[in-house]
Image (spheres, rainbow, N blue to C red):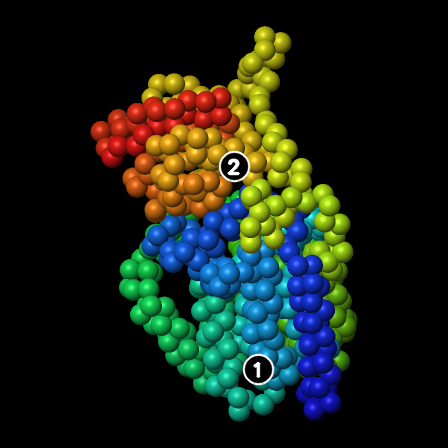
């Protein structure tokens, strides 16, 4: 890339960064329209880390610490969590900015390099996880970050630089990006590590490969020194718990649906067409590595909520990068392969367009949101009142209750789950559908009225055990901010609270089956100490 083109690229990326980050910051708070449960989950993780707790050691989560550490450090410094979230994204994008510029300048054309840089910045600075539904959300922000790191690592590994003299820098970048994947979400590392390794070998970037290995080893060694060898065992234990969970191992469509259902078939055919055409055009390594990336593309999409194929823009970048070196080659069907590759890249971007424009426009939609219909997640205000959600999702509490089987007119649906049971008592069948902040706050404040419960730790037989966020209660040592299996934290809890209408009935059933097993085995004793129309409270003795 010429100096002139490099300058234009740098200006373009700086302007994109300034526009996206500026639009996010200027609002002065974080205004969300959905996924308030995920928002509270994020807040608990951040507050635990800001208080000095270490993920996997002190609480259970399959998500890597790097997903929350920058936010936690800003909160620890006194920032409200809403602006801490926004500033953490801005700081992360600022760190990525010179890396993205270098990668684009050293191996891509000005147009493709600009597209690549814009895609990475949008992933890092968006205020929605993707898809085409425009309501703003912080849910799964770590998936966006992991995709951004994967984009960088894959492009560096698969597209050799024009000038190979900077292989040390390329190796450092790959090593850092792979480490980022490991410390954000292990799914991405498992899916893309092998193709990245083979790409570096097949493109003869052996020096970069060696440097990346050393860089990754240094990063992992530093984490081990800081957290201890047991950290990795604890991290692996949390990951295994999720893999073995029937509730959260794959929160969406089945794998075959992600590959072949009507919503995804176009994407699947586009990557298959890219592999065939790249091989026919003589880009043998490119076609092979894209083929090896394909299972990872599908698996990550399957494993992520929403099943949004964020790999499509990356596929377009890779196709366009290889297309630049393809001459007027014609295949057996008489197709001009340079033009055919351009068509497949355009198809990939067209399929990705709804999600991309949703991501790219989200900071600007956030800036111009009317703030009237929003309410703070925490009603008592304070520095963390800068996280605000649409009022109806905060303060209107709706329940879902079955009608079949509850009236003589409608027989019970045969496939309905059995009602939860504890100590021989059958509990109601119903779930809280809306108003989680008001629901949690009501539980916590009611517990505060009982002097002996104030300041205690409470395990909740539900998806969340976060009542300490909303009242004068202690954090649950060893708990899980999001339930994946077993009864994490119950052994350290003073009390167990059983909501009569939980957030997730299937979770409550699984928790209580586990608790009943512990009681039968003689390792747990529960004594009922309080009963209201919202919950039953038991004293825990282990």
Q: Residue at x 51, y 61 (%)?
A: 78
Check disc 2 and report its element: helix, strand or loop: helix
Single out the residue that lies furthest toward the top: 408
Q: Nearer the viewer, residue 293 or 249?
A: 249
Q: Position of residue 539 (x, y in %)?
A: 32, 30
Along the line of sight, the residue nearer the viewer: 201 or 193: 193
Residue identifier under label 2: 441
- Residue 462 sits above or below residue 425 on the image: below
Q: Which residue is at a point 57% across and 36% down the rendered structure image?
A: 438
**Image-based side of 440 in relation to 527, left or right:** right
Q: Quadrant of residue 363?
A: bottom right
The first of marks 2 and 1 along the sequence is: 1
Residue 411 in view: yes
Q: Residues within 10 Å of mark 2 (few under 14, many from 20)?
A: many
Q: Kindly identify the residue that appears in the image at 22 percent across and 29 percent down.
A: 522
* CA gap, disc 2 and disc 1: 55 Å
Which image quarter is the N terminus in?
bottom right
């Amino acid at each position: 890339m010429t100096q002139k083109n490099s300058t234009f690229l740098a200006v373009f990326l700086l302007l994109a960064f300034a526009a996206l980050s500026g639009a996010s910051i200027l609002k002065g708070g974080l205004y969300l329209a959905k996924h308030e449960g995920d928002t509270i989950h994020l807040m608990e993780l951040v507050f635990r880390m800001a208080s000095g707790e270490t993920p996997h050691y002190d609480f259970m989560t399959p998500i890597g610490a790097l997903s929350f550490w920058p936010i936690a450090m800003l909160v620890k410094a006194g920032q409200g969590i809403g602006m801490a979230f926004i500033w953490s994204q801005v700081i992360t994008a600022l760190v990525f900015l010179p890396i993205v510029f270098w990668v684009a300048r050293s191996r891509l054309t000005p147009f493709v390099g600009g597209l690549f840089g814009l895609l990475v910045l949008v992933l890092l600075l968006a205020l929605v996880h993707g898809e085409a539904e425009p309501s703003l959300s912080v849910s799964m922000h770590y998936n966006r970050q992991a995709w951004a790191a994967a984009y960088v690592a894959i492009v560096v590994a698969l597209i050799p630089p024009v000038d190979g003299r900077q292989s040390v820098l390329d190796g450092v970048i790959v090593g850092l990006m792979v480490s980022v994947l490991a410390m954000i979400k292990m799914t991405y590392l498992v899916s893309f590590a092998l193709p990245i390794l083979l790409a570096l070998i097949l493109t003869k970037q052996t020096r970069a490969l060696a440097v990346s290995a050393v860089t990754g080893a240094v990063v992992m060694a530093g984490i081990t020194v800081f957290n201890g060898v047991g950290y990795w065992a604890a991290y692996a234990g949390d990951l295994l718990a999720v893999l073995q969970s029937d509730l959260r191992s794959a929160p969406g469509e089945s794998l075959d649906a992600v590959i072949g259902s009507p919503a995804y078939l176009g994407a699947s055919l586009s990557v298959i067409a890219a592999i065939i055409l790249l091989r026919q055009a003589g880009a043998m390594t490119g076609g092979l590595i894209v083929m090896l990336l394909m299972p990872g593309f599908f698996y990550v999409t399957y494993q992520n909520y929403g099943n949004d194929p964020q790999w499509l823009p990356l596929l377009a970048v890779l196709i366009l990068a290889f297309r630049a070196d393809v001459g007027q080659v014609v295949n057996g069907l008489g197709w001009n392969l340079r033009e055919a590759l351009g068509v497949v890249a355009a198809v990939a971007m067209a399929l990705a367009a709804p999600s991309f424009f949703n991501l790219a426009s989200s900071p600007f939609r956030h800036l111009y949101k009317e703030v009237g219909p929003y309410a703070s997640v925490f009603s008592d205000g304070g520095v963390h009142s800068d996280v605000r959600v649409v009022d109806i999702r905060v303060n209107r509490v709706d329940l879902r209750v079955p009608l079949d089987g509850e009236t003589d007119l409608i027989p019970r649906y045969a496939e309905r789950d059995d009602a939860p049971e504890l100590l021989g008592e059958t509990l109601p069948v119903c779930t809280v559908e809306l108003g989680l902040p008001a629901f949690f706050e009501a539980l916590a404040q009611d517990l505060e009225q009982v002097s002996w419960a104030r300041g205690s730790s409470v395990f909740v037989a539900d998806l969340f055990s976060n009542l300490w966020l909303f009242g004068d209660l202690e954090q649950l040592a060893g708990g899980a901010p999001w339930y994946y299996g077993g009864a994490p934290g119950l052994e350290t809890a003073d009390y167990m609270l059983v909501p009569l209408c939980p957030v997730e009935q299937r979770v409550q059933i699984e928790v209580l089956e586990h608790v009943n097993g512990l009681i039968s085995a003689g390792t747990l004793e529960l004594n009922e100490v309080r009963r209201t129309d919202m919950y039953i409270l038991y004293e825990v003795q282990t």
